[in-house]
Image (spheres, grey):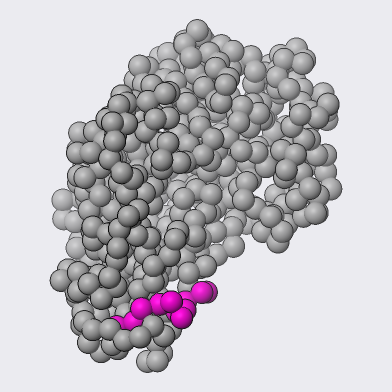
Amino acid sequence: MNGIADATTLTRLLDAAATRFADRVFLRVGDVTRTYAQSREAAATMAGALAARGCRPGDRVAALLSNRIELVDLILGCAWLGAVAVPLNTGLRGQGLRHVLLQAEPSFLFAEPESARRVLEAGHRGTLWVTGDEGVPTPGETEAVPPAPVRPHDTAAVLFTSGTTGMTRGVRCPQAQFVWWGRNVSAALRLTGDDVLYTCLPLFHTNALNTLAQAMTVGATCAVDGRFSATRYWSRVADTGATVVYLLGAMVPMLLAQPPGRQDRGHRAWRGLSPATPACAWEPFRERFGVTLVDGFGSTETNLVIGATPDEYRPGYIGTVRKGFAAQVVDENLAPVADGTAGELVVRSHQPYAFSPGYLGDPEQQRDSWRRTGDRVVREPDGWFRFVDRIKDVIRRRGENISSYEVESVVQRHPAVAAAAAFPVPSELAEDEVMVAVVVRPGGVLDPEELARHCASQLPEFAVPRYIETVPALPLTETGKVRKAVLRERGVTPRTWARAARRAHGASAGS
């Protein structure tokens, strides 16, 4: 055993990786490059700096920081000390920020100058550290301290859910959960020590945060960028020497909508983890950019339960159950349904502490219990799972359940469409009508009536959108997920195109 395989906590994983891969580059964040040995030293001395300011094991240390080296130092330093890192969504403000601070109750909070005032206005009464100020804990200012004797089930971080379908909740993520993320995803992506992992997703989200553990598992390099830019994406991938990229499904159509150029293939990346990629975008993405996308199911509360690999994948499917996990599809009474029937995905883990034990303020769930996901899926007879929709996003029309995901997939096949979101709006029949918000490709022109005909050729009549509205951009969370609650609340506007109520085609004036 090499030490890495024996690691059961994030701290032991970092320690083992630094011993085995000492002089290999681990991190590139902004202008900072660190080897594995330097990263261990930074974590150990950051832990000392935190301890010198009164931080103790179990204390919660929040951060309202963008993707910068200080955030990585804080997360790894807290893990080393046995404190709990609480990286917060940088877009939070006002009532939303007050909500998460009331849940997390951090004793300490690290913020950038532009967000410090927001933190105080939101009611933080603990210690506040502002980047650039004197007295801020910094790696190297104290002697290294030994790692705290943390256990696999001890909380390493509290990560807040995206809040796209309700109020955000703080998920308690144990030390071992990150270790399992590293093992499971590195195995699925076939990672090696020669890989460079590029992410521009925010480190307050589990997708980006667990790339650190993936790199440590195999001795790869993790390149962390500031934020996603569709226009600069491939040049940044090339600049970092990345061989692996990390995307979310909504980003894929954005990249495909960009004008073709030499940068499309001027990089080394050949595979990428991209949950919720529209099936229609899979092959065009691979043909244009040379990158094979790998889908999967995992959430802040769970792990990579279902997934594909670069060698074995199916466009439009999230994969098969990974080793160490179990999954079922159930009805509203939680009874298993037959293969080929849509139902809610429930999952369980046989890997110790690979799942969160629960949310802040809630009692811990049993380790071997089935967990409801809120995702509507279909399991095929050969064991492959297909995502249908978030249960809260299902549209009910004329007695039929309509998948917003499937409507979006059809809309996005139209050559003038760059991105789309389908959602329900009230109908005069006390059910739902289907509405889509559409972003048009640069230089493109979209005729709503022609788009409705396109949908009618590929969807059952009851699923064809009644309302279509072009928008300059979809409202997104900081992690790139569409905020459908914003679209539902806005609903039909004077700019909305509407087709006749009970006809497959045809138009009326906007209503």
If the image is split into quadrants, where does the C terminus sit? bottom left
Residue at x 43% of width, y 65% of height: 471
Rendered view: 422 above or below 353? below
Task: Estimate the x, y position of residue 281 in percent, counting from the top left.
Answer: 25, 49
Task: Give the x, y percent position of residue 260.
Answer: 27, 40
Q: Position of residue 476 (x, y in %)?
A: 49, 56
Residue 358 horizontal side relative to residue 143, left or right? left
- Residue 496 falls inside the magenta stretch: yes
Report the residue at 29% width, 36% height from top. 261
Side of 70 relative to 491 (left or right): right
Quarter residue 62 falls in:
top right
- Residue that appears at 68% across and 40% down: 63
Q: Decide if residue 179 is in sight here.
A: no
Q: State which quarter of the image contains the N terminus.
A: top left
Q: Is residue 474 magenta?
A: no
Q: Is residue 374 visible?
A: yes
SS majority, magenta:
loop
Would you place residue 407 above or below residue 384 in this image?
below
Image position of 333 with respect to 281: above or below: below
Q: Which residues are magenta?
A: 489-499
